[in-house]
Amino acid sequence: MALVQERIRNFCIIAHIDHGKSTLADRLLEYTGALSAREMETQVLDNMDLERERGITIKLKAVRLQYKADDGETYVLNLIDTPGHVDFNYEVSRSLAACEGALLVVDAAQGIEAQTLANVYLAVDSNLEIIPVINKIDLPAADPEGTRAQIEEVIGLPANDAILCSAKTGQGTKEILEAIVKRIPAPKGDKEAPLAALIFDSHFDAYKGAVPNIRVMDGCIKKGTQALIMGTNKTFEVIEVGVATPGVKIVESLEAGEVGFFTASIKTVSDTQVGDTVTELKQPVAMALPGYRKAVSMVYCGLYPVEASQYEELKEALEKLQMNDSALSYEAETSVALGFGFRCGFLGLLHMEIVKERLEREYDLVLITTAPSVNYRVTLTNGSVIQVDNPTKLPSATEVAGIEEPYVKATIMVPSDYIGNIMELAQDRRGTFLNMEYITPTRVMLFYDLPLSEIIFDFFDQLKSRTKGYASFNYELVGNKLADLMKLDIMVNSDVVDALSCIVHKDKAYNRGRVLVEKLRSIIPRQLFDIPIQAAIGNKIIARETVKALRKDVLEKCYGGDITRKRKLLEKQKEGKKRMKQVGSVEIPQEAFMAVLEIK
Amino acid sequence: MGWHSIYIHIPYCESKCNYCDFLSFPLVEAVVSPQDYVELLKQEMVKWPALTSPGSLYVGGGTPTVLPAELLADLIYSVCAYFNLRPDAEITVEANPGTVDFAYLQKLKEAGCNRVSLGAQSFCDAELAAMGRTHRAKQIYEAVEAAHLVGFDNVSLDLIYGLPGQLLEGWQKNLQQALALDVEHLSLYGLSLSSKSPWGKLKKEGRLTIADSDLSADMLALAREILPKAGYLPYEIANFAKAGYASRHNTAYWHRQDYLGLGVAAASCRGNCRWQNKTNLGFYAQALLAGLRPPSEIEALDAATVLAEAVFLGLRLAEGIDPVEIELLYGQDMELVYAQELAHLQLVGLLQKENGRWRLTERGIFLGNVVFQYFLP
C-alpha cells in the first residue's frame, strides 16, 4: 500500500569526522527496531572494510525506519547517509538534495569544524530544515552551552532548542526522533505528475548490475517502468524496486516523496551517475532536476604494476572498481621508465589512496604509484588549448604560450593562536589571502585562494601539525589561473626518467629540484658505477647529486661451513633486487617514484 | 666415498662478545656440561660411517679452549682414531688468547693438533675491551710465543676490521703488529652485524656506527696491498697465507668437498645434500640420548643449486674455477648454463677468464656478493 506523503520524513546527518555520525545512526536504527541491539554490527552504514578501518564513510546509502511517534501515528523516516570528506563534496550536495531536513551533529567537546560548516551551508542552500544536535554530552570535557553559543554565532542558527544527546549511551535518541517528525517538513511531490527521481548514490551488485539509490520527487516508479536516465539518455526497463530497512525489501512501487532503489540490469554505475535524473520514457519531464554534473577528477597519477605480467590483471581490476565508482577514471598510458600502466583520475588524494589500497588488497596487485598531478590547461603558441594531467605530456617551453592551473577557495578554521602558522603555510603554498573572520573571540575562519596542486600533497598534514591538530579545512574548486609554471625533469644516469617529472612553479623549481635529487640519492642504492642524478628545467641543469659506485659488498665470514646460510643471504639480496625497477642500466626502488610526495 | 673433512662445534665461550651471532653460550649458562657434551659428540660420531680417511679436522666454536685441555685432547684423539685421519691431516683448534698457555698447547699437540687458529681480532686494547673480548694484546703475544715454543709451525690469527671508531691508521697498526708476529696464516673479517648480536641491536637503533662500505673497502684494499709484500698470499677473499700454508680445511668448503659436522648446530655436506644438526643444545642432546642422529632436516639440493654453489664457492678462491673440472664433477657445462651471466660480469669488469680458469677481478673480490647472486637459480 502506498505511503501517505504526510507521514514520510527524509533526512540526513551532517557531522565532522569523529563527531559521532555513524554511532548516532546506529542508535536511531536500534531505537526504531530496524535492528536489534544483538544484530547490530556497530556502524551498519559503513559497509566496506576499508571504511570501517579509516573511520570514514565513502559510499552513501539510505535506510528506511518505521517510527511510532508520540502523536500515535507511524512515520517512515528515510535516513540518507553522507560521506564526510572534502573529496566527496559533490556527493554530499546530492544526498542533501534528496532530503527535507538534516541533523547537524556537533561534538560538545570539539565544537564546530570547517568541514561541518561547509556541509551546513550546502544544506542551507538546499532549504533544508536543520536540527542542531549536541553530541557526546557524557564526556567530561563536554561544553554543551559553549557549543550551543557557537552554533548560533558561527552558523547563525537558533540553537535554543538544540537537542543534547550521547550517541554512545543512547541519551536523547527519542527527542531526536520526535524532532525529526515535528520539525522536518513532509515531502511535497505530485504523485500524478511525470516521474522525476534524483539519483543520489549508485553501487554495483554482481548479480543485479548497477543499483541506483533514488529519491522520487514526483510521479511513481515500479516494475516495468521504462526508465530514462536523462544525463546519459539511456533507457532501462525496471526489474524491481525496493528499500533498505536496512535489509533489502522489494516493494511494489516508489512514489513521490519516497526513497529507495531500483534495478534494471544496468551494466555500469557510470550509466547511473550521482545527481542524474530518472524519468519515464513515455512521459518524460521537460527538465532534469537541477545540480547534476559529471564527476570530475581533480587529481591524477600513474598506476603501474611492478611486475609487467600483472598489467592485464590491473586493467580488469580497474574495470571492476569503476563499475562501482563512477568518479574513478583511467586510461592506458606508457612510461619509458615504468612500462605499461594507467593514468587514473580521482576526486582527491584520499580517493586515490583508497583506490590504490583496494587494488592492492582486493586484487592482490603490487603497484607503483607516480606522484599525483592536477589537470593543467595549457595554451600553445599556435593558439590551441590542451589539458595536461601528466607532466610528461607538457610540450617544451618554446611551444607553450601559457599554463593555467586549477585554484581552490580554502576555508580554514583554527584557534586564533595559530593564525601566524597558518598564514606562513598558506604563503609558502602560494596562497592569496582573501579574508579573515572571528567567529568567536578565540576562533577564526581564514579564507585563501590556493593552487590545487599545492594542497594535494601534504597540505592537510602540515595544517594539522602546525596547529596541534586544531585546524579544520575545506575547499571548493573556483577555476583556473594563469601561473608561471614549468616542467622539472629528473635525469638518472643522464636519461630523463619520465615518471619522475613534475610541473612546478618557477619560484619553487630550484628548491624542489635540489631537494628531490637529494632525496633520490638517499633512496637509490649504490650500484656498480657512479650514477649522476640531475634535476633539469629544459636544457638547464639546476641540481646534481651522485650515487657513488658501490665499492664493497662481500660476505667474508665462513660460518663454520654453513654454506646454506651464505646462500640464503645471497638469495635474500637477489630478491631485494628483483623488487626494483630497471630503468636503463640503473635499478630504482619503488619508493623513489613517490619521493616527490615526501618533500616538504 | 668418505669424508674429506670433519668439523666439530664447541658451543661454549667465556662470555659472549658484542658482535657475535654464532651459536655459543657462556660456559656458566650451559644446560649441558662440557664433559657430557664431549660424550655426546663421541656418541654422534659413531653413528656416521668412518669410511676413507679425512684430510682435515677443525675444532671450532665458540671457544673450544674453554674446555679443560685433557677433555679437548681426548676428543681430538677419539675423533682421529674413529675416522682414521690421514697421518698428514691438518688438525686445527680455534683458541682465544688468554685461554691457552704452554702446558695447554702442549697437550693439544700431543693429541695430534698441528694448527692453532687464534681469535686475536685486534691489537688495540680499547677495541678489544669494546668488543667484549676477555683478552688483551699482551695475551696474543703470549699465546703466539707459547705456540711457537711448543713447536706449532702453523699458527693463524683472526683479525676484524671496520670496528666502531676504527680508522684506517688503526687498522694498519693492527696489520703491522700481526705481521711482526710472523705467523703462517691470517684471516681478515670485515665487521658485519646481524640484528641478533648486542652491537647489531645498537646499530639498528642508530646508537652505534661501524665502518661504512667505503672505509671497509679501503681497509681490505690496504691489507691486500701490505700482506702480499710480506709474503702472505690472498688465496681466498678473507684468507692470506705464506706459501704452502693455506688452510686445507676451509679450502675443502670452497671446493665443495664432503664434510661432516659434529656437535650442536654443526653443518655438513655430502654430494647434493646439506644438513645442519639441531641448533638447540637441549634438543641436540635429547636426540642423541634417544639414540637418533641429530640433524633437524636434510636438504637435497637440485642440480642447478649444486652448480651455483660450486661456482660461487669456487670463485672465492684466488685460483678460481676450471669449467672442465666443474663439468667433470657436476655434469654441467657452466659456460653454457651461465653464458649470459658470465658475459655480463666480464663486461662490467667483475670476472675474468685466464688460462682456462674463471676468477674474480680485483674489483670482483670486493663485490663478491654482486657476482655470486648471478649464479643462483
Image: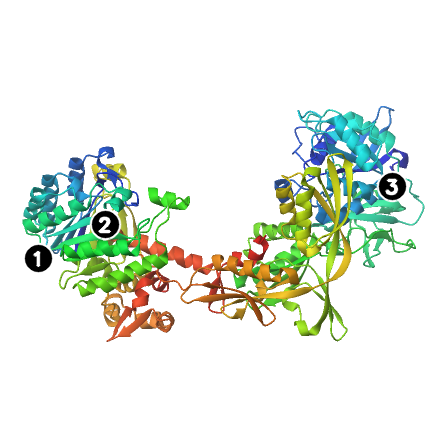
Q: Which amino acid does label 2 sit on?
A: Ser
- Frontmost residue, A142 versus A53: A142
Q: Name the residue under label 2.
A: B122
- Above or below residue B158? Residue A245 is above
- Frontmost residue, B2 versus B39: B39
Disc 3, SS = loop
Q: In this view, does A152 lie to the left or right of B325?
A: right
Q: Are marks 2 and 3 on the same chain?
A: no
Q: How far apart are marks 2 and 3 (CA)?
A: 84 Å
Q: Distance between the residues labelled 3 and 1?
A: 103 Å
Disc 1, SS = loop
Q: In this view, does A567 lie to the left or right of A361?
A: left
Give the residue displayed 26% in from the left and 75% down from the top. Answer: B354
| Chain ID at mark 3 | A
Q: In which quarter of the image is the C terminus of chain B?
A: bottom left
> Circles 2 and 1: CB distance less than 8 Å?
no
Q: Mark 1 points at which residue?
A: B88
In the rendered image, which quarter is residue B247 located in?
A: bottom left
| Chain ID at mark 1 | B
Percent x, y of residue A495: 53, 70
Q: What residue type is labelled 1?
A: Asp
| Chain ID at mark 2 | B
- Above or below residue B208? Residue B173 is below
Q: How far apart are marks 2 and 1 (CA)?
A: 32 Å
Give the residue displayed 32% in from the left and 62% down from the top. Answer: B366
Percent x, y of residue B36: 17, 36
Q: Mark 3 points at which residue?
A: A127
